[in-house]
Image: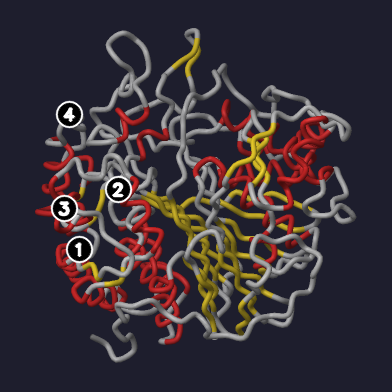
Amino acid sequence: MSGRLRALRPVALSVALALPLVAHATDAPSIAPDRTAVVAQRYMIAAANPLAARAGYDVLAAGGSAVDATIAAQLVLGLVEPQSSGIGGGAFLVHWDAAAREVMSYDGRETAPAAAEATLFVKPDGERMGFWDAVVGGRAVGAPGLLRMLELAHERHGKLPWAELFQPVIDLAEQGFEVSPRMAALVARDKYLDRYPETRAYFFPGGEPVQIGHVLKNPAYAVTLRAVAQGGADVFYTGEIAAAIVDAVRAAQDNPGLLSIEDLAGYEAKARPAVCGRYRGHRVCGMGPPSSGGLTVAMILGTLGAFDLVPRHPASPDALHLFAEAARLAYADRGLYMADSDFVDVPVEGLIDPGYLKSRAALIDTAKSMGKAAPGEPPRRAGALAPDVALELPSTSHISVVDAAGNAVAMTTSVENAFGSRVMVRGFLLNNQLTDFSFLPERDGVPIANRVEAGKRPRSSMAPTLVFAPDDSLLLVVGSPGGSRIINYVALAVIGVVDWNLDPQQAINLPHVVNRGGKTDLEEGTAAEAHAAMLTALGHDVSVRGLNSGLHAIEVRPDGTLLGGADPRREGVALGD
């Protein structure tokens, strides 16, 4: 192993590697008032597990780029947080090249097999399959995109050798790591994780679910990663590993899938232009189709640009009302228009057109809810479509990085549902991302944009986001897991920083309000919950519930100081120097 990167310790890490920042908005409501932002001067990473964050931190300390650090952190997340992401899944990465002053996004979304048809999730009687009937097994496994995408980003933006980035996680997989409370709890309550032999043997050693603090080793994952480290992503997409993936998918008991060797060998990661909207003089850039994240975040923010949020308290009922109404409108358009733009004519420019968003904002009444919002008619829309029928459950992860050269990465990564398809092969879990497609291909004879098609990428809500100040300097790197709620989480965090002058940790700590076109969800146990009755009086259908985001954010101050935040609702940390 190179002397630049040391092996990760198989124990929980102390996160006191930087001094806390004194809060500059002390009246901000918070679910964790004792957690303050981490301060650094040169580089920083925020990720969902201390071991993953430390892997990325060590890469940055060794002179690695933001992409290098992201790769190292992601490989560790696939080991210590397999319920959320891994090499059997996919990701979206948004990159800021400080020297070239260029934003580029990288699409590592899974693709449907060539044999997939529009009726993949339709039963013989014409009814849609039950969600869990579709998820567990091989049917919903798409060709994984993560490694191809990371390799493409590394070719363009990496500094350290590809193989060097794999060694810390290989060592950790062989030596073992302590199972975290979150992982142990999710294993214990999962109803399907023991269905398949390899998965059962790994997560239920001795027949019992792994416990907190149990030192779990994954030598099979180490072998897989050592091969990819030496031979590149081709080793994963062809040869023995690819054959093992296909065999596992097609042999999955009760629910086999369609994935083929040709699907894997032909997978292509794509570099795409980022989608950028405007919000109060700021440029907000994110991932475009096949993700709905960048567009829908931009639409929420662009709609709220018609209202002055600065004097409104972050958890006040009028602020929550305005946010929920703007989200309601944006999600109505999301459900109708957004899908894989390689297959569907998505009116990207029309949806974020300032005039269009101004017309949508005019539909918001500050004194009452509009109830169900109808999709609008943005400029440059084409063809008749029907609203989507899809369900996205929250099991994903996010990494934010700024390196010493000022380059930045926001990457959101997923296997879709917790533990994905529950099919494990060669030490990693396979995704169930195809259930992000609409289960029904049409409504009343009108096609749904996000229907299943061979080779198509299912629509996502992942929203890795970069925010630039009015002078076009990088201001914020942010993203979150959370299924279709991701968009709300990210948009509110941006508002916290831009409108309410919160540091990233305070913005992350804000009580959540979520609207996806129907109910207005308020986060239980927070200041938002107290306004349930008032919002109900305004006409909202209110639900008080847990809203388990996993926001990770880094703010770049005008003097270059970095402020990092990690969501106290999960196990993440921000580390910097």
Tell me which numbered mark, 2 or 4, is placed earlier along the sequence: 2
- The CA distance from mark 1 to mark 2 is 16 Å
- The CA distance from mark 4 to mark 3 is 22 Å
Can you tell which quarter of the image residue 577 is in? Answer: bottom right
Tell me which numbered mark, 1 or 2, is placed earlier along the sequence: 2
Tell me which numbered mark, 4 or 1, is placed earlier along the sequence: 1
Give the residue number, with chain letter if any, for mark 2: 144
For the residue labelled by badge 3, is the local secondary structure a helix, a strand or a loop? helix
In the rendered structure, the answer to whether residue 139 lies left or right of residue 404 reads left
Which numbered tag is attached to residue 207?
A: 3
In the rendered structure, the answer to whether residue 153 lies left or right of residue 307 reads left
Say whether marks 2 and 4 touch (CB < 8 Å). Answer: no
Say whether marks 4 and 3 touch (CB < 8 Å). Answer: no
Give the residue number, with chain letter if any, for mark 4: 254
Q: Position of residue 512 (x, y in %)?
A: 66, 49
**In this rendering, is residue 400 above or below 362?**
below
Q: What amino acid is found at the position of numbered circle 3 in the picture?
A: Gly
Q: What amino acid is found at the position of numbered circle 2 in the picture?
A: Pro
For the residue labelled by badge 2, is the local secondary structure a helix, a strand or a loop? loop
